[in-house]
Amino acid sequence: MATFRRAVVPGATYFFTVTTYQRMKVLTNAPFYSALKNALRQVNAEYPFTIDAFVLLPDHLHSIWTLPPGDANYALRWNLIKRLVSQATRHLVESPISRSHQQRRELGLWQRRFWEHQIRDEQDLVKHVEYIHWNPVKHGYVARVRDWPYSSFHRYVRQGLYPLEWASGDETNDAVEDDYGEPR
């Protein structure tokens, strides 16, 4: 089995891509969305982290987290979040799961692994935040960033960090050129 090396720096900021098993398009359905919100709140209450940016699409999500000083255990947090969402929605998941998934008592909602990238500096952070907010347009779910409801973009607008019309014209966004853990 392959050994994965992950960045584990206490108190760092990380970008994540988490994907559903076989790219099932269910995450924006009300029961899954609600279960994810509840899981994020529940895990954050026990193992605090700051969600700096977030977008939820039907088959994956992207998020940027900052962990508390002295803490680098984002893997535990994702494990708990994925487990809580899977348990809350187990009666709704209809994907055939492999023998390996059955042996591990996995419910077949999530891919086992996730993509992680440690944010290096302010420019890297801005690039990843823009990628997150542009993602629904990139995947063709909406024509304008502001039209996607499952995004921290709206919080950024409320805080005055982005204008409502950000990336709404015919201009291209540099973030489109990157894939940040998404299959091509």
Image (cartoon, helix red, strand yellow):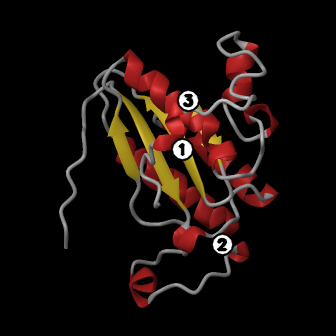
Q: Residue at x 28, y 24 (%)?
A: 70
- The percent coordinates of residue 163 (x first, y second) are 73, 15
The answer to which of 167 and 133 lies nearer the viewer is 167
- The percent coordinates of residue 159 (x first, y second) are 70, 12
- The percent coordinates of residue 22 (x first, y second) are 54, 74
- The percent coordinates of residue 62 (x first, y second) are 54, 44
Q: Residue at x 57, y 49 (%)?
A: 61
The answer to which of 137 and 37 lies nearer the viewer is 137
- Is label 3 in a helix, a strand or a loop? helix
Circles 2 and 3 in contact, beta carbons < 8 Å: no
Residue 101: which quarter of the image? Answer: bottom left
Circles 1 and 3 in contact, beta carbons < 8 Å: no
- Identify the residue position indicated by label 3 in the image: 130
Estimate the spatial distance between the alpha carbons at disc 1 and disc 3, rounded to whole Å: 11 Å
- Is label 2 in a helix, a strand or a loop? helix
Estimate the spatial distance between the alpha carbons at disc 2 and disc 1, rounded to whole Å: 22 Å
Q: Amino acid at mark 1?
A: His
- Identify the residue position indicated by label 1 in the image: 62
Image side of residue 2 versus residue 123, left or right: left
Return the mark for residue 103. none
Q: Amino acid at mark 2?
A: Arg
Question: Is 57 placed above or below 118 here?
Answer: below
